[in-house]
Image (cartoon, rainbow, N blue to C red):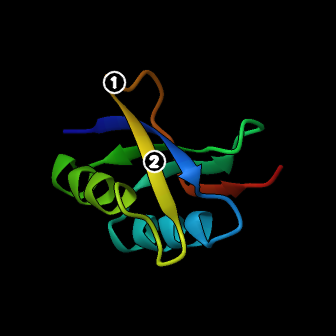
Amino acid sequence: MLHELFIKVTGQVQNVGFRYQTNKLAQEFKLTGWVRNAEDGSVEILAQGEKKYLVKLLSWARKGPGFAQVKKIDVDWRKPTVKLDSFEVSRL
């Protein structure tokens, strides 16, 4: 069954490899969706896939890569409306 997860990570999360590492994990877990830097300094992630792998991604996002300082994380489990085909990294 396909699940969808939206995550907004706030703190010192840009320019620390957050998008790169998220993409790497998404490929490893065979997730689809995207990760992007938001204008407010946060990182946003939309991922689709098996729930067990989305939970692993969420667990990792709570800490982020080594130089990140995650202050807050907002999580929204959603019912997918469209099936995404790949995982993409968006740039500002």
Q: Residue furthest right?
A: 92
Q: Mark 1: which amino acid?
A: Arg
Relative image position of residue 79 (x, y in whole percent) = 32, 22
Front-lying residue, 24 or 74:
74
**Residue 71: which numbered mark, if any?**
2
Q: Along the horizontal axis of the image, is 26 left or right of 20?
A: left
Q: Residues within 10 Å of mark 2 (few under 14, many from 20)?
A: few
Relative image position of residue 78 (x, y in whole percent) = 33, 24
Front-lying residue, 91 or 14:
14
Relative image position of residue 74 (x, y in whole percent) = 40, 33
**Residue 78: which numbered mark, if any?**
1
User: Image point 47% across, 73% down: which residue?
Assistant: 65
Proximity of marks 1 and 2: CB atoms separated by less than 8 Å: no
Q: From what the image shows, is residue 65 above or below residue 86?
A: below
Front-lying residue, 83 or 91:
91
User: Judging from the image, what secondary structure is the residue with disc 1 in?
Assistant: strand
Q: Name the quadrant containing residue 52.
A: bottom left
Q: Earlier in the sequence, mark 1 or mark 2?
A: 2
User: Judging from the image, what secondary structure is the residue with disc 2 in?
Assistant: strand
Q: Mark 2: which amino acid?
A: Lys
